[in-house]
Image: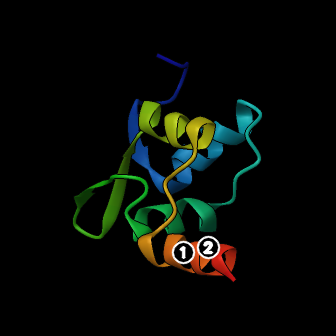
Amino acid sequence: MYKGFAEVDTIPNTHKRLREEGYHVSVCMLRGLVRSGALKAAYSGNKALLYYPNVIKVLQEGTEPPEAVKRQILRLMQQ
């Protein structure tokens, strides 16, 4: 475990840990990933709690584009 940080934490604390470890990610990006469903979160009231290894996995491996984007790309390739 990283000193002073928990494996499961809020978005602002996860952002702070990411910055200390050299990842340049904004709080808004983390919230957007949670909102879109690309990053899974557990909730305690209104607070989203993120599991740090999952955050790192999403940042390193990326996410699948939504189906609408895939269809649009295919349509453009067929033109």
Q: Position of residue 9 (x, y in %)?
A: 40, 43
Q: Give the residue type that dot 2 points to.
A: Ile
In the picture, residue 75 is in which quadrant? bottom right
Q: Nearer the viewer, residue 75 or 19?
A: 75
Secondary structure of the residue carrying tag 2 is helix
Viewer-closest of 66 and 25 = 66
Near-viewer residue (63 or 14): 63
Look at the image and name its color scheme.
rainbow
Residue 68 vertical position relative to residue 54 in the rendered view, above or below: below
Taking 62 as reference, is 69 above or below it? below
Instruction: Say the numbered circle drawn on residue 29.
Output: none
Residue at left 54%, top 75%? 69
Q: Is residue 36 left or right of residue 42?
A: right
Q: Quadrant of the C terminus?
A: bottom right
Residue shown at the point (49%, 62%) measured from the top left: 33
Type of amino acid at the residue the image marks with label 1: Val
Outermost residue on the front side: it is 78
Q: Quadrant of residue 73?
A: bottom right
Residue 7 rendering spot, x and y as whole percentages: 40, 30
Q: How many marks?
A: 2
State yes or no: discs 2 and 1 in contact (Cβ < 8 Å). yes
How far across and how far down the image is residue 27, in percent? 62, 61
**Residue assigned mark 1:** 69
Residue assigned mark 2: 73
Mark 2 or 1: the one toward you: 2
Q: Position of residue 3 (x, y in %)?
A: 55, 19
- Who's the residue at 42% across and 53% down the image? 39
User: Crowding near pointer 2: few (<14 within 10 Å), some, many (20+)?
Assistant: few
Label 2 to label 1, Cα distance in Å?
Answer: 6 Å
SS at circle 1? helix
